[in-house]
Image (spheres, helix red, strand yellow):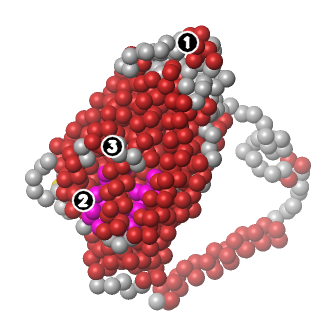
Amino acid sequence: MTLPTLDLVVLLPQLIVLTAALLVLVVDGLSGARSWLLAGISLVALLAAGAAAIWLSLQPGEPRRLQAMAVADGFALLFDVVIVVAAVLGVLLAYQSIPRISQQVGSYYALLLLAVVGMMTMGAALDLIVVFLALEILSLALYILAGFNRSEPRSAEASLKYFLLGAFASAFFLYGAALVYGATASLNLEAIAAALAGGSRSPAMLYLGIALLIVGFGFKVALVPFHMWTPDVYPGAPTPVTAFMSAATKAAAFAAFLRLFLTALPTAQPTWSWALAVLAAVTMTLGNVAALRQRELKRMLAYSSIAHAGYAAVGLVAGTAQGAGAVLFYLLAYAFMNVGAFGVVAALERAGEYDVARGRLAGLSERQPALAAAMAIFMFSLTGIPPFAGFFGKLYVFGAAVAAGWGWLVVIGVINSVISAYYYLQVTVEMYFAAPAAEAPAAAAAGKKGRAVAKAAAPSPAPEEGKAAPAPLSRATAAAVLAAALGTVLIGVLPALLTGWIAQAVQGIF
Amino acid sequence: MPSDYLPILILIVLATVFAIIAMALPAVLGPSRKTKAKLEPYESGMVPYTDARRRFPVQYYVIAVLFILFDIEVIFLYPWAVMLRQLRLFGLIEMAVFLGILLVGYVFVWKKGALEW
C-alpha cells in the first residue's frame, strides 16, 4: 500500500502550541508550580505560533494542504493571528489571578494552549470531520477552564451548564454534518460544493442539515435562540478564562462557519442567508436590550458579546468576499477590545467574588486614571465610535451588508449600536463623573491625585482599603490591558494596515 | 434488498429460542432448593442493601477516569499492530508520537499524585 505524504508544515502553528502544552505539563509535573516559567513557555509558544502563521501566509504559490483535511491559506492563518492575540492576552491576565483561585496553574496553561490548538484547527479545516474534531478539542478544554475556580459553586455551575449545552450543540452539529453528507455524499468542503454545483438531488435533507449546522455554530458563537448559556457561563468562569473564550471561541467558530458556508454551500446561499439574517437581527436586539439592565460588569459584557456575535453574523449574511473580510477584521478588533475590557474587570475584581458590580467603577478615574482611560477606550470601541477599532469593524461589516443588498439588516444593526451606546457610555460616565460609591471611601481618599498615567500601571491602590481591596494591579495584567488598548487604538487609526491583507486572504475560501 | 437482512432475522429468532430454552430447561429439570444467601441479589460479594448516598473516596473517580483513558489507548494499539507491516517506519513513528503524548500525561498524573491511594 502507498503511504500518505503528510505536509505537516500546514499545521506548524498548531504543532508549536501543542508541543508547548505538553512541555507545560511536564515542567509542571516535574518541577512543581513555577508560575512564571509556565506562563513564559505559553507566551513564547503562542508568539512563535503567531510568527509561524505569518511566515506561512507569506509563502508564495498555492496554499499548502494536509491531504484534503486542512489547508494553510491566508484565511486560516489570519484567524490564527486573531486567536493568538486573544490567547496571549488571556495568558497575561491569568498570571495574577489564576494562582489566587487554584493550585493547578500548569493545568490552566496547558488547557488554554490545547484550546488554542483546537481553535486554530477550526480555521484550517477542509473537512467536516476535522471541523468537528477541532470543535471538540477546544470545547472540552473550555468546559474545564470555565469551572477552574473550584471553590466557587457558580464556577462549577458555569462549567456544567456549558458542558451539557455544549455537548447538546455538538450533537446538533454532527447530525447536520451527517445530513449534509447524506445529501452530497462527501464531507470534504470542496467536494460538497462540487456535488451541489449541479443542484441537489435531495434538497430537504440538505436544508435540514444546513439548519442543524447553523444551530451547532450558533451555539458556539452565541447567536440568539442558542445563547442561553452565555449570561451564566461568562460571569461564572474565572475572568481571564471569560476574556479568552469570549474572543477566541467566537473567532474560531466564525472561521469554520465562514469557510463551511462560503466554500461548501454557496449554492444554497439564498436560503441560509435569510435564516442567518433573522438570527443576526434577533441576536443584536436581544443582546443589547438585555445588556441595558445589567448591574454587573461581567454579565453586561456577556450580553454585549451576544450582541457582537450578531454584528459579526451580519458580515456572514452578506456572503461576499467583502463580508468575510469584514468579519475577520471585526473579530480581530473584538479580540483586542473585549479581552481588554475583561482585563479591566479582572484588575478590579476582588478575591472570592462572583461578579463586579458597576458601582465599583465610580471614581475610578481618580483612583486609577490609566485603568479608567483604558476602559473608556474599550467602551468607546465596543460602541463603535471612531477612531477606535470597533468603529471600523462595524463600518466594514455594515458596508459589506449594504453592498450585498441587506439594507434593512444594517438599519437594525445601526439602531442597535445606538442602544448599546447607553450601557457602554454609562460605564464611562460612572468612571469619570460619578462620586465614589460608599463601598470604597478609603480608596478614594487614598487615591493620590495627579499620578502620572504610566505610573498607574504599577501596583497602585493603597493598603488602607482593607482586606476586601482588589489585589494591586500586577505588571502582567497591566501589560495585557495596555497591549489591548494599544491594539484597539492602532487598528482604529490605521485600519488600512490590515484591510489589504485581509481582502487578499479571504479570496482563498471562495 | 430486504433479503440481505434475512440472516439477521434468523439470528434474532435463534437467539430468542436459545434464551427461552436455556431459561426453561433448568426450571423444569433442575432441583430447586432455595436458601437465604442464594436469593440475595448478586453484587460482587458486597452487601447489597445500604444507603445509596454513602461516602466513598474521591480517588475512585480519578482512578476510574484514568483507567478508561489508558484502556482505550491500549485498544487503539490493536489495529495498529495488525497493520504495522504495511505501515512500516511511518506507522512506527506515528505510534511513537502517540505514545509519547500519552507518556507525558502519565508522568503528569503520576507526579500530581493522582495514582496514590
Q: Looking at the image, is A90 positioned above or below residue A435?
A: below
Q: Measuring from the top left, give residue A372's x and y in whole percent.
A: 46, 28
Q: Residues within 10 Å of mark 1 (few under 14, many from 20)?
A: some
Q: Earlier in the sequence, mark 3 or mark 2?
A: 3
Res. A83 visible in picture: no
Q: Report, in whole angstroms, how far the alpha carbon at label 3 lies from the one at label 2.
A: 25 Å
Q: Report, in whole angstroms, how far the alpha carbon at label 1 lies from the one at label 2.
A: 52 Å
Which span of residues is magenta-colored? A307-331
Q: Chain of mark 2?
A: A
Q: Measuring from the top left, give residue A374's x and y in whole percent.
A: 41, 31
Q: Measuring from the top left, give residue A82's x and y in whole percent.
A: 32, 45
Q: Looking at the image, is A143 positioned above or below residue A30?
A: below
| Residue A317 within the magenta-colored segment of the rendering | yes
- In the drawing, what numbered circle is on residue A400? none
Can you identify the residue that label 2 sits on?
A506
Amino acid type of the residue tagged 1 in the rendering? Ala
Asked if both marks, 1 and 2, belong to the same chain, the answer given is yes
- In the drawing, what numbered circle is on residue A387? 3
Asked if both marks, 3 and 2, belong to the same chain, the answer given is yes
- Label 1 element class: helix
- Label 3 element class: loop
Q: Are marks 1 and 2 in contact (CB under 8 Å)?
A: no
Q: Main secondary structure of the magenta part?
A: helix
